[in-house]
Image (spheres, grey):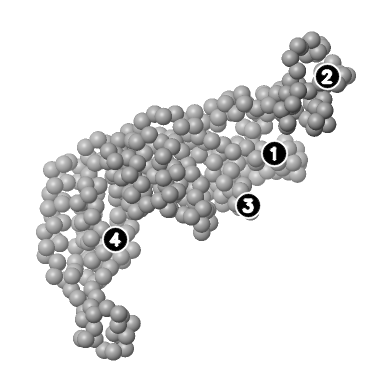
Amino acid sequence: MTKESANSSKKPLCKVCEKPMQRYGFYQSGKQKWYCPKCKKVFSKKRKTFSFKQDVKGFADWLLNKETATRTASKSRSTFYRKNKKLWLINPVIDVTGEVYKVIIIDAKFLSNKTAVLLAVTPDFSVGYHWSRGGERADEYEALLSKLPAPKYLVCDGNKAILSVCRRLWPKTRIQRCFFHIERYIEHKIGKRPTTEAGAALKNILYSFMTVKTKLGAKRAELKFWRLFEKYRAFIHEKIYRKDVPPQDANKREYKPWWYAHKNLLAAYNHVISVIKNNQLWWWIEDNIPRTANDLEGGYNARIAELLRCHRGANLEHQKRIVEWYLLSRSQFGIDGFLSDYLSQRPTFFDT
């Protein structure tokens, strides 16, 4: 390499203190040395863009597969870990393009009791994520949704935080409730094998909802549900009064003069009523959008759990990097697009 850098009229700035550096002789290879009088450090003007890009891609490939470091590395495992130690500090970011998507699916994946990643994906690729320290809270979802333009449809599990934030930030977005989460909520309330006739009839209605394919069929399914609700209304709203039960049972509820005899069954019916009244059930028929969040649950959350299991023993910060690299790999521009932007912003000067 020639001494062309010595003829430069502009003095480069130090990457640490951003002060002008001065020439400090040459290496044996002919490269110009630069010295910062303030930091007392020597720098060289060199780029390792190609090798660095290959190192990052190799690191990401190791994170996103099931192979161990011993099998992945061409050298020893300790050398592989030492070489990639600084690569854990890179924070993969999914760029927000501003494109208005037809449908966005939102859900959360918990890494611990309080740490969760809030995901926003389309049926084809991931569009954003946000790390939450307080679980599925409204302010955390607001931090995620505020970055994205309002889509035409939103598919979600019906979490109250998501619904409240969506109504405030995306008032024109139509909400499609996930059929699977509705069914799971009903099973949580009345069980997989309901002991009451009203509960068994409700489960049959939910199964019939899954077979609907036309708007006319949707109206008939809703009418069938309302008839069922009217049939069992008296049973569902049956009350127990404290004066009519033994004292040992009433003492637990002595602050209430009465309570519902079938509280869980009432909650299950009210859940379906709320979904129907808010028109959050049949948008998938009109515009061919997903009626469940399976694209996210099975396509993202399941894979994240698998990767964390393969890299078990990683601390929380490393687990976050694994999740971020995976989401980046499933984004619109992928890892190559991120590295192109990242390398263009890297400092030209490195410590020697």
Query: Residue 327 at x, y = what percent?
Result: 50, 39
Q: Which residue is mark 2?
A: 23
Q: Which mark is residue 214?
A: none
Callout in the foreground (2, 4): 2
Q: Which mark is residue 315?
A: 3
Q: Earlier in the sequence, mark 3 or mark 2?
A: 2
Query: Residue 143 at x, y = what percent?
Result: 45, 44
Q: Amino acid at mark 2?
A: Arg
Q: Earlier in the sequence, mark 2 or mark 4?
A: 2
Find the distance from the CA under tag 1 to the CA under tag 4: 48 Å
Q: Earlier in the sequence, mark 1 or mark 4?
A: 1
Find the distance from the CA under tag 1 to the CA under tag 2: 28 Å
Residue 348, image quadrant: top right
Q: Which residue is mark 4?
A: 186
Asked whether the residues under the numbered discs 2 and 4 touch, taking CB atoms below 8 Å apart as contact, a structural biologist would say no
Q: Residue drawn 74% across and 41% down?
A: 82
Q: Secondary structure at mark 1?
A: helix
Asked whether the residues under the numbered discs 3 and 2 touch, taking CB atoms below 8 Å apart as contact, a structural biologist would say no
Query: Residue 87 at x, y = what percent?
Result: 66, 38
Q: Secondary structure at mark 4?
A: helix
Q: Which residue is mark 1?
A: 86
Q: Is residue 342 above or below residue 194?
A: above
